[in-house]
Image: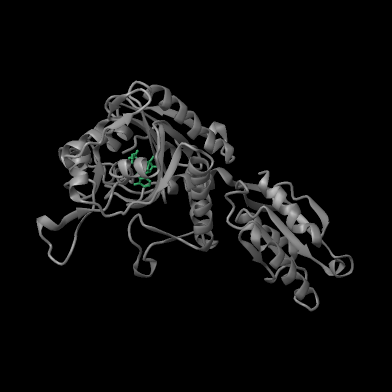
Amino acid sequence: MDKPKKSAETGASDRMHELISLSKRRGFLFPSSELYGGLNACWDYGPLGVEFKNNVKQAWWNVMTRQRDDVVGLDAAILMARRVWQASGHEAVFADPLVDCTNCKHRFRADHVIEEQGSLDVCPDCGMRGTLTAPRQFNLMFKTYMGPVEEDAALIYLRPETAQGIYVNFQNVQQSMRKRIPFGIAQIGKAFRNEISPGNFIYRTREFEQMEMQFFVEPGTEDHWFEYWREQRMQWYLDLGMRREHLDWHVHGDDERAHYARAAVDVYYEFPFGWHEMEGIHNRTDYDLRRHAEFSGKDLTYYDDQKKTRYIPYVVETSAGADRAALAFLADAYDEDEVEGEKRVVLRLHKRLAPVKVAIMPLSKKEPLVTLAHEVHGKVRPLGLAQYDDTGGNIGKRYRRQDEIGTPYCVTVDFQSLEDQQVTIRERDSMQQRRVPIAELYATLAADLADA
Ligand code: GAP
């Protein structure tokens, strides 16, 4: 339920067009159900897309759980009891204001129309005056039924946020892992929202993935942890190479905050279509645990045996979208330069995020070069996805194809390699080349990829 701010840069639609076209052409993303004309705002990640997005999620999981002692992981079911969403407040208030145009029949989010044109006087699509209806609230949760009978008693929802799976497991995790407050629970998983105006590629979709962490703290310490986590989350994007000038904070005003949040700040990214929310950091107080205690009748208090106090913990949440982050990393990495008088498209992705880590390129398809090249390929496979590229075209063209998908290293196996057992490593950004012994290739690349 984000709120756009300020301008879009010039040439924005060209940049988006380039990104979408590259994504399709090179196997990052395809429109869902394309054979049947596509399904609005749903996307499928192709062979390179799934590697790339997995790398984004892995980078998050590593920093948020494995490298910390105070955060543990969880993978809760998408389908949860309906009472969860009654307790959380989503059934009653997780809604966006909707207006319809009585002329062109198109539907809009009232807050977006007001943001863009100041009032609801004119339809943004057909331009007719006075045709937009009064706003009405539209609940964003997808409904379905558990079991064979479609009756009210069987109604459940596809989760609109992963956070609730964490709250209802708070005690299970705390007790089984013997965690002391402060500690957090992290989860990556699908979420679903029946968005009124999805769009901008994978920015706003109806099925998406969240990377969320709920940090449980002693009441009174939440402001400290809120500041701590907002800095941590900004640093994560910077550490993965995102440009600082494309990142900003957006502090939520009273009219913007979700029903559960006392304070909220977004990490904003300057997408090609303007500044928009990429991640939210929220002070959710004890709202969720208190509501679940009320609705379930269970005691969800925590006993601090050192301070001899009992309380319902407060929660600081970090909530990032894996797809939005992926789009931002792609947009940030996209670059064009000129090599030997020709345009080169290069994705300057952080090495950790690049879908293909290394490409092996034999200079010829003839033996015994091919056998040696396959041997070299086998040696570098443990580094991550290693592509064997013996497709036609000169070596320059093959480099360009790897640059376009962000491959940090290309390794050329040439006739000289048969003599001296050395290969050439060519680096994506500097385009510099160096010869290394095949025996040292794995260690050399592993070291380069590790210190990224
Ligand atoms: N648990 C809190 C929560 O869900 P949110 O601000 O509604 O907060 C958090 O969503 C993040 O989830 C957003 O910052 C965004 O990255 C991602 N997200 C939300 N709706 C999305 C959508 N329709 N498509 C893609 N990502 C979405």
| Front residue of this view, candidates 173 and 130 | 173
- Residue 389 lies, in percent from the top left, at 67, 67
Visible in this render: residue 391?
A: yes
- Residue 88 lies, in percent from the top left, at 22, 40
Visible in this render: residue 14?
A: no
Name the residue rendered at 23%, 33% in the picture. 290
Name the residue rendered at 41%, 35% in the picture. 183
Q: Is residue 127 left or right of residue 53?
A: left
| Front residue of this view, candidates 15 and 364 | 364
- Residue 89 lies, in percent from the top left, at 20, 39
Q: Is residue 199 left or right of residue 447?
A: left
| Front residue of this view, candidates 331 and 164 | 164
Image quadrant where one finds the C terminus: top right
Quarter assignment of residue 225: top left
Which residue of the protein is positioned furthest toward the right in this rendering? 419
The quadrant where ligand 1 appears is: top left
Image quadrant where one finds the N terminus: top left
